[in-house]
Image (cartoon, rainbow, N blue to C red):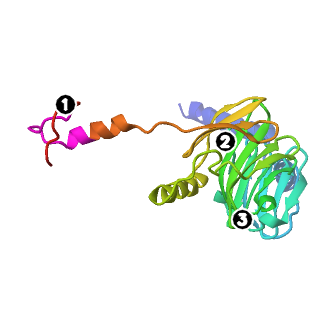
Amino acid sequence: MIASSIRRVCLIVLLVNLFIAFGPAAPSHAQTKAANATAAANANTAAAAWSVKVNGGIRWQQITPAGALLVATDSSLAGVDIDHGQVTWEKPELAGIAADSVRPMEDSLLMIAERPDLLTIFDPVTGAVVFDSRKLALSKVVTRRVLPQSGTLLVHGQRTEGPAVVALYDLSSGQQLWVNDSLFTQGDAPKKRGFGALMQNLTRMVGSGTELEVLQAGPDAIIVHTLMGLRSLDARSGAVRWSASLPTQRGAVARHDRRRRPASAPVPGPSAPRARE
C-alpha cells in the first residue's frame, strides 16, 4: 500500500517536470516589446492614411452629399478631396462661418453658404461659384430654385435700393443668362388712385418679398406665380411674355360670412332681404 502511494507521487512529479521542460514557453521581454511595437506601427498606418494642413484653427467639418469634405477654419472655408487628401479650394470670404449656415441646396448637389452680407451657391467638389448675391447687390435672397430640365438656377431677391430682380444662371458654368427687374411692376395693369393705388403698391411690395412658385420651367418659358398673379417669362431673355390676374375667392368669403351668421337669421339671396347684424 505504501509502495503504491510512493509510485503514484513519483509519477506525478515526473509529469510536472516533463510539462515544464517541453510545454509552451512564455514569451521573453524582448519578444513582447517587439510585438507591441509592430501593433503600434500598424495602428498608426491605418489611422494616418493622409493628413492635411489648413490655415487657422478648425471650427467644424462635414461631408457633403457630393462626397467632398468641407473644413471651416478661422481664415477660410476649404474643400478637401477625401480620396487623395488634398485641399482643392479655399474661400476666404467665408472665414469663421457657422456650421448651420452651410447646407445642401434642394434638388441638387450644390451647397449654400449664407451670412448677413452674403449668400453664395457653389459646387463643393470644385469650389466653382454658381451664384453670388453681391454681384446683383441683393440685400435679401427670397427665391432660389434649381430647374433640372434646363440645367439652370432661378434666383429672385430684393435690393436695398431699386426694384426686386429675377435672374437665371447656368448650373455648369455659373454664367448669368439674364436678369429681369420689371417682374413686380404693374406692367399693363391700369393704375389706380386713392386707396386702390395704396393697395396696388402694397401688393407689389409684399409680392417682391414673397417666394416665387415655379409652375412650369421648359426650354421656351418659365411660368411663375406671384401675389400679383401669373407671369410667363421667356426662358432665353427673361422678358415677360404675358401676365394674368387670378380671381379672388369670393365664395370662401361668403361661406365665412354664413358661418358667422346666427342660425335664426335668413341667408340673403337674389330676392331675400338682408338681416341686420
SS label for mark 2: loop
Disc 2 from disc 3: Cα separation? 20 Å
Which label is found at residue 271? 1
Q: Which residue is mark 3?
A: 97
Assess disc 2: are there few (<14), some (14-19) or many (≥20) residues with their C-alpha within 10 Å of its C-alpha: few
* In front of the other: 201 or 61: 201
Q: Which residue is mark 2?
A: 106
SS label for mark 3: loop
Work out whether mark 3 precedes mark 1 in sequence or the reverse, and give the earlier one: 3
In front: label 3 or label 1: 1
Q: Residue furthest left?
A: 264
Disc 3 from disc 1: Cα separation? 67 Å
Q: How many marks are shown on the rendered structure? A: 3
- Counting from the top left corner in percent of width and height, residue 45 is at 87, 49
Which residue shows up at 70% across the image and 67% down it?
161
- Counting from the top left corner in percent of width and height, residue 148 is at 74, 33
Amino acid beneath label 3 = Ile
Disc 2 from disc 1: Cα separation? 55 Å
